[in-house]
Image (cartoon, rainbow, N blue to C red):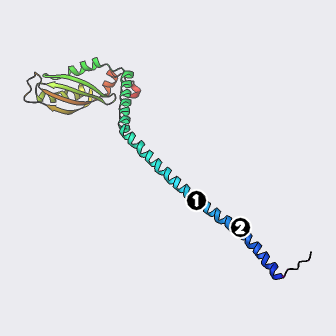
Amino acid sequence: MINLLAPELIARLRFSHQSAILRRWLGILILATVGLVFILGFGWIYINQQNKNLNRNLEATKSQLQAQDLAGIQKKAKDISGNIKVINQVLSREIRFSDLISQIGSVMPPGAILSSLTLSKVDEGLDLSASAKDHTSATQIAINLSDPKNEIFEKVDIVNISCPADNVNFYPCSASFRALFSKTTQSKFLNVPESQQ
């Protein structure tokens, strides 16, 4: 086939055809860019909104935990766990309190009586409360209990002695002591095997 068109017209037609294709691709590229910008903008807004929602949920959860006093509950659980350990130690070692109380009673000075005996920790000792006629008798309790000849306690600390003037009881003074078991007491009253001493 013979082309009778002028070469300029042929070149112009070719450029217009290429220009139309180029405009079409440019339009597609612009639409794709607009779509991509729209998707990125929508995604950023969505992620930002999700972040705010998660922060609100986190704050709500924290306030619920504070309202439920989780730290207090954990502390109580630890205390209960510690008490259970002490109870297990007491039960496994079979403390003979009757013998121990008799031994303590035998070293009490005249004018003083044992009021209470509280096990603080099995290996560490006891908290003792006593009543006395006067301040001298109250301090003598600590001296008698810590005397190595009695072989009850290795060390006795006076926690408190109070002798109110308005108290009309026969034993007006009250005294508190913290006592550490001696090795002899552990084997005598606590049934601690020699290997654990």
Amino acid, disc 2: Arg
For mark 1, does the 10 Å Cα neighbourhood hold few (<14), some (14 to 19), or many (20 or more) residues? few
Q: Residue furthest front?
A: 4
Q: Which residue lies furthest to the right in this view?
A: 1
Q: Which residue shows up at 17% across the image and 29% down it?
A: 175
Q: Which residue shows up at 24% across the image and 25% down it?
A: 149
| Left or right of 121, for residue 111 | left
When asked about the image quadrant of residue 142, the answer is top left
Magenta residue span: 1-6
Closest to the camera, between mark 1 and mark 2, is 2
For mark 2, does the 10 Å Cα neighbourhood hold few (<14), some (14 to 19), or many (20 or more) residues? few
Measured as percent of width and height from the top left, residue 194 is found at 39, 25
- The quadrant of the picture occupied by the N terminus is bottom right
Query: Circle 2 — which element?
Result: helix
Amino acid, disc 1: Phe
Vertical order, 117 against 57 (above or below): above
Measured as percent of width and height from the top left, residue 46 is found at 53, 53
Q: Mark 2 points at which residue?
A: 24
Q: Nearer the viewer, residue 137 or 67?
A: 67
Q: Which of marks 1 and 2 is nearer the N terminus?
A: 2
Q: Nearer the viewer, residue 138 or 150?
A: 138
Measured as percent of width and height from the top left, residue 75 is found at 36, 35
Asked if residue 122 lies in the magenta stretch, the reply is no
Asked if residue 5 lies in the magenta stretch, the reply is yes
Q: Name the residue under label 1.
A: 38
